[in-house]
Image (cartoon, coloured by chain):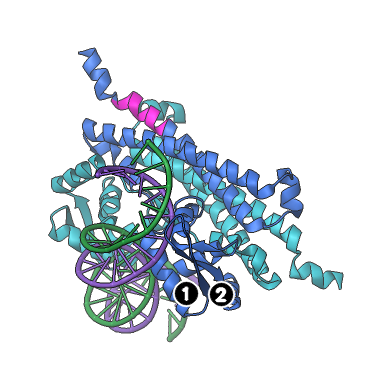
Chain colours: A blue, B cyan, C green, D purple
Amino acid sequence: MALRHAVLAALLDGEYSGYQLAKIFDLSVSNFWHAVPQQLYSELSRLETEGLIRGRQIIQHDRPNKRVYTVTQAGVDELERFALTPAKPGIIRENLLVMVQAVDHISHAAADSVIAQLEDRAVAAAAKIGVFEHTLKHLRGDLDEETFLRTGSPLGPYLTCLRGRRFEQENYEWFTSTARLLRGRTGTQAEEDEAS
Amino acid sequence: MALRHAVLAALLDGEYSGYQLAKIFDLSVSNFWHAVPQQLYSELSRLETEGLIRGRQIIQHDRPNKRVYTVTQAGVDELERFALTPAKPGIIRENLLVMVQAVDHISHAAADSVIAQLEDRAVAAAAKIGVFEHTLKHLRGDLDEETFLRTGSPLGPYLTCLRGRRFEQENYEWFTSTARLLRGRTGTQAEEDEAS
DNA sequence: CTGCACATGTAAGTAGTTACATGATTAG
DNA sequence: CTAATCATGTAACTACTTACATGTGCAG
C-alpha cells in the first residue's frame, strides 16, 4: 500500500475526480509518483470505503457527471502516520537508460532507434519544463521565489515542483547531449546514405 | 517482462552471480532500474531456461560456491529487439517526495521526521556521488573525459553513469536545501526546547 | 562463539498493468 | 457523423515485495 498516500497528498489541495487525478498523475505528480488511470479509480474506491476520503457527485450538464473527492480527518491522520515512518527508498525504472547501457553491443539500426527515442524524450522534457515553470509562477502568485519560500504557502507543492523541474532539466540536458554524442560516434543512417 | 532487459544489459560487461548483481542493482544500476535480490535470482533462472544467458558454477574454497552468468547470442538478439521497440515512459516512485507534498498539512513532529529523512538522504546521495565519480574514473582509464566520450569504450555504462551522477547531485542539492528551508520555517524541536 | 558477508532459494501475498467495456457531450 | 475529451469501471494477468529458510567461512 503505497499509492494511497500519493493520492491523499494529491487531494490535499482541492477536490478532484478520478479523471482529473489521472491527468495530474500524468504531469506534476508523475515526477515522484507514477500511476495509470485505472489504479486511481480503484484506489479511490478503496480509500472511500476506508473513510480516508469522501466523495460527492457533481451533476454536469455540459459533460458527463463526475465524482470528486476530499480528504477526511482520518485521511490526514493517515498521512501524518505515514510521514512519521521511514520512507522506503525511491525507485526508478527507465527502459531508455537500459538501452543506452547496452548501446555498445547492439546494431547500428538499433542504436539509431535509441538515438531517435532520446531526441523524442528531449522534446517531451522541454515541454514539461514549460509546464512546471507555469505551475511555479501560479503557485507563488505575485511573490518572488525567495519571498515565497520564506513566507508563502502551500509550500509542499512548490518544493516538489522545484524538484520536478530540475529533474526534467537534467533529463533534457542528458537526452540532448547523449543523442548528439551517439549520432556523432555511430553516424546516422541518413549520413551514410549521403556518403554513398 | 521488463526486468529481464535490465539484467541482460548489466551482464554485458562481464560474468556476475546473482549476489553480485544484487549489489550492482543497489548501486549504479539502481539509478535507472530498481530490483531487490529475490527478483534477480528468479529472473536469472528464467533467463537461463530461455537460453538468453548461460550460467557456470565457480568453486570457491574461501567462501560458498557461486553461479555466474554470461549473455548468450540469443540474449544479445533479445536486447537488439528491445532497443528497436519504443521504450515505455520511465517511472518514479518516491515516498519522501509524497511526504514533502503533504508538508503543509501535517504536525510539527511529522514535519521534523520528514526533515530528518531529507538529511539522511542527502548524506546517502553524497556517498553515491563519490562512488559514481570513482566508477567514471575507472571506466575512462587514463583518458580525459572529452577524449573518452569521443573515442573510448564501452560507452554505454559511462553515459548511464554520468546520468546517475547528475541525478544524485540534484538529489543532494534538493534534499539539502529543502531540509534547511523546512527547518527554518517550522523550527526544530531542539530549537523550541532551547527557546523555552 | 557471535556476528557479518557471501550465496541462493521457496512460497505467499500485494501491487501494478493491460485489455476490454460503456456511455455522454462537444467540436469540427 | 466522426473523432476527441470527459468520465468510470470490471476482469484477467503479470510483476513485485515480503517473509521465511538454509548454509558456508572468516574476523573479531
**Residue beneath the point at 71% across and 55% down:** B181
The percent coordinates of residue B147 (x first, y second) are 42, 26
Q: Which residue is mark 2?
A: A75
Instruction: Look at the image and tell me in which quarter the C terminus of chain B lies.
Output: bottom right
- At label 2, the amino acid type is Gly
**Residue beneath the point at 28% across and 53% down:** B7
- At label 1, the amino acid type is Leu
Check if mark 2's residue and mark 1's residue have beta carbons within 8 Å: yes
In magenta segment, residue B100: no
Query: How would you classify the magenta stretch by its main secondary structure?
Result: helix
Left/right placement of residue C1 relative to residue A82 reads left
Q: Is residue A11 visible?
A: yes
Q: Which contiguous range is marked in magenta?
A: A177-186
The percent coordinates of residue A195 (x first, y second) are 24, 13
Q: Which residue is mark 1?
A: A47
Q: Is residue B67 visible?
A: no
In magenta segment, residue A178: yes
